[in-house]
Image (cartoon, helix red, strand yellow):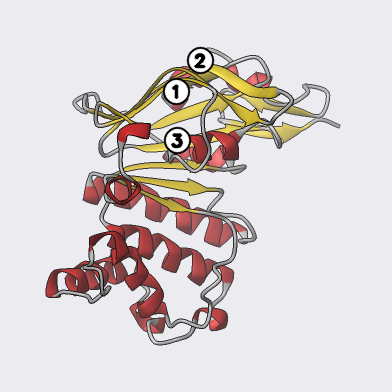
Amino acid sequence: MNSEKTDNVLQTEDLSIGYLSKRKKTTIAQDIQLKLKSGTLIGLVGANGIGKSTLLRSLCGMQKHLGGTIKIKGKEIHTYHPVELATLLSVVLTEAPASRNLTTTEFVSLGRQPHTNWMGKLSELDRSKVEKAIEQTQIADFREKHCYELSDGQMQRVAIARALAQDTEIILLDEPTTHLDLYHRAAILKLLKKLSVTTGKTILFSTHEIDLAIQLADEMIVMTKNKTITGSPRELIRQGHFDALFPKDTISFDADSGRFTIQN
């Protein structure tokens, strides 16, 4: 982690997440303390069903948290108007977009919606943001293709470009490497790493690619049944937190190599 980065753009205190119904409150995780800094890439990892997506939805305001506070730039998230929040935080989900008939450029342009006037007309500034996002994600070669013509890897880059065009300080991504082969999984995570460095944005992504996240992330959030821990990959390895992710009789973690191995 870069030690000079001290400004927390997203912070939680005693955060509890889960679901509310008329009959009961179901808590998935609690006592979550996060301090996410500018210009950092943060990997969120944990076993299936542990609550990673719920945490991301809570952090962006899509799902109400059960307790504690979520602050963006020092202000509690529920005090932001949705349009104002959309100028600070963008989200890339795993679901296929509903607007796959749009061209790549048209889809990326949707990221400018929080900034356009009531008619949705793009200004010169809006167009320049779109062009810069297309350049940053290296998707110019298929900018005129329709989204339904794109591969999964290409579509993921387009979705990231839309978030970049939105020009927010924080980008949250829910499993951006889902359905991709090893090469494209590594390429997407390397792209996120580069963007966090070159743009100064705070980029938080959930992933099952723990080995890759350990190599690329500045910080990691490890969710287990009992607690949520944050720190640099090196600190978390030294403290043995990756050992608790999976049953040791099936998968073990090698602290020297930073990799998981299957037990015979």
Which quadrant does the C terminus fall into?
top right
Q: Quadrant of residue 105?
A: bottom left
Under circle 2, the secondary element is helix
Q: Which residue lies furthest to the left in this view?
A: 124
- Check disc 3 and report the residue beneath it: 59
Q: Between 98 and 200, which is closer to the camera in this rendering? A: 98
Q: Position of residue 38 (x, y in %)?
A: 25, 36
Q: Where is residue 218 in the image (x, y as percent from the top left)?
A: 37, 33
Q: Which residue lies furthest to the bottom in this view?
A: 144
Vertically, is 249 above or below 123? above
Vertically, is 178 above or below 261? below
Q: What residue type is labelled 3?
A: Leu
- Check disc 1 and report the residue beneath it: 234
Check contact, mark 2 vs mark 1: CB within 8 A.
Answer: yes
Looking at the image, which residue is at 53% across and 61% down? Answer: 184
Q: Which of marks 3 and 1 is in front?
A: 3
Marks 2 and 1 sit apart, C-alpha to C-alpha, by 6 Å
* Left or right for 191, reference 38: right
Vertically, is 260 above or below 67? below
Query: What is the crowding at mark 3: few (fewer than 14 residues within 10 Å), some, or many (at least 20)?
Result: many
Q: Between 149 and 216, which is closer to the camera in this rendering? A: 149
Q: Position of residue 143 (x, y in %)?
A: 37, 82
Query: What is the crowding at mark 2: few (fewer than 14 residues within 10 Å), some, or many (at least 20)?
Result: few
Marks 3 and 1 sit apart, C-alpha to C-alpha, by 25 Å
- Check disc 2 and report the residue beneath it: 238
